[in-house]
Image: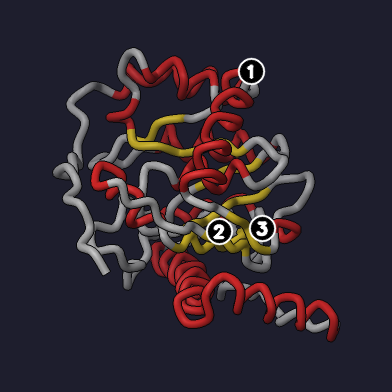
């Protein structure tokens, strides 16, 4: 198997003040994604289905309406688009603030993306996510934080997704994206086969002010679910997982999910 192409160095802080991003949050809280979202979804879907042979498994696990948090692993800049192109719902993405620069900030803002300032305790990002979920929207958040540089799913989650799940009570759909770590090898004319598997939704009892320990416990459980899905794709491949999912459906088996956090 070929080596992964190198990634740019991660930038973990944004020198721009909080006030610089207020307009992006205001738009995300009050307006829905417009035609830009549909255009980008069409273009990225064509790329994903053609060059990456992207296919999805169990998209029906994403509720057709109502608030939901989508929680994928994160290897590639394409992950945002891959989880959104496979489902009908418009997904609102929480993205690092460094992306909000001209000319691309037009695409992000009109596409429903909102910023999170890495390296800072960004309450505005959580307020925006809460607002979208209260309106019955779908928010995507990576429990690993930034992209994995090793091509492997992280061992530990960032607790932010646990906080969002507990404060809103919204169901969380764990998602495994397999193969996207090699998308950055495109300059070598290497295009991987990508599979996106949507797990069963998990929901926790709503807690107004969850402790750090409670947030971390939920985030860790979400990551365990993602790692389980990813391991299945590693072991059995796309066809093998599809067969297992179909067999479970025929047998009427769905593993129990969900827990309350003490």
Q: Nearer the viewer, residue 211 or 27?
A: 27
190 lies above or below 85: below
- Image quadrant where one finds the C terminus: bottom right
For residue 167, say whether it is visible: yes
Q: Secondary structure at mark 3?
A: loop
Mark 3 neighbour class, 10 Å CA radius: few under 14, some 14 to 19, many 20 or more? many
Q: Nearer the viewer, residue 236 or 22?
A: 236
Q: Please tell me in which quadrant of the rendered image residue 172 appears.
A: bottom right
- Image quadrant where one finds the N terminus: bottom left
Q: Residue at 45%, 76% (x, y): give it.
A: 234
Image location of residue 112, percent across then percent down: 55, 27
Image location of residue 23, percent across then percent down: 44, 15
Q: Secondary structure at mark 2?
A: strand
* Label 1 – label 2 distance at C-alpha: 25 Å
Q: Does label 1 or label 2 sit earlier along the sequence?
A: 1
- Reading the image, the residue beneath label 1 is 35
- Reading the image, the residue beneath label 3 is 171
- Reading the image, the residue beneath label 2 is 196
- Number of numbered discs overlaid on the protein picture: 3
Q: Residue at 60%, 79% (x, y): give it.
A: 240
* Label 3 – label 1 distance at C-alpha: 27 Å
């Amino acid at each position: 198997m070929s080596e992964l192409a190198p990634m740019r160095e991660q930038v973990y802080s944004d020198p721009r003040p909080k006030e610089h991003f207020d307009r992006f949050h205001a738009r995300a809280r009050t307006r829905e994604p417009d035609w830009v979202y549909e255009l980008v979804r069409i273009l990225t879907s064509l790329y994903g289905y053609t060059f990456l042979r992207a296919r999805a498994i169990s998209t029906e696990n994403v509720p057709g309406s109502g608030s939901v948090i989508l929680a994928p692993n994160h290897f590639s800049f394409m992950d945002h688009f891959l989880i959104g192109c496979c489902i009908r719902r418009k997904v609102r993405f929480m993205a690092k603030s460094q992306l909000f620069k001209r000319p691309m900030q037009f695409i992000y803002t009109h596409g429903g993306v909102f910023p999170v300032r890495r390296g800072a305790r960004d309450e505005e990002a959580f307020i925006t996510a809460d607002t979208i979920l209260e309106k019955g929207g779908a928010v995507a958040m990576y429990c690993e934080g930034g992209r994995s540089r090793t091509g492997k799913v992280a061992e530990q989650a960032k607790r932010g997704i646990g906080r969002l799940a507990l404060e809103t009570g919204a169901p969380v759909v764990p998602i495994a994206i397999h193969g996207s770590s090699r998308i950055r090898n495109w300059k070598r004319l290497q295009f991987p086969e990508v599979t996106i598997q949507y797990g069963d939704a998990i929901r926790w009892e709503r807690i107004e002010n969850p402790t750090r320990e409670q947030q971390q416990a939920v985030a860790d459980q979400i990551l365990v679910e993602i790692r389980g899905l990813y391991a299945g794709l590693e072991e059995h491949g796309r066809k093998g997982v599809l067969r297992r999912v179909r067999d479970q459906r025929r047998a009427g088996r769905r593993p129990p999910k969900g827990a309350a956090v003490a």
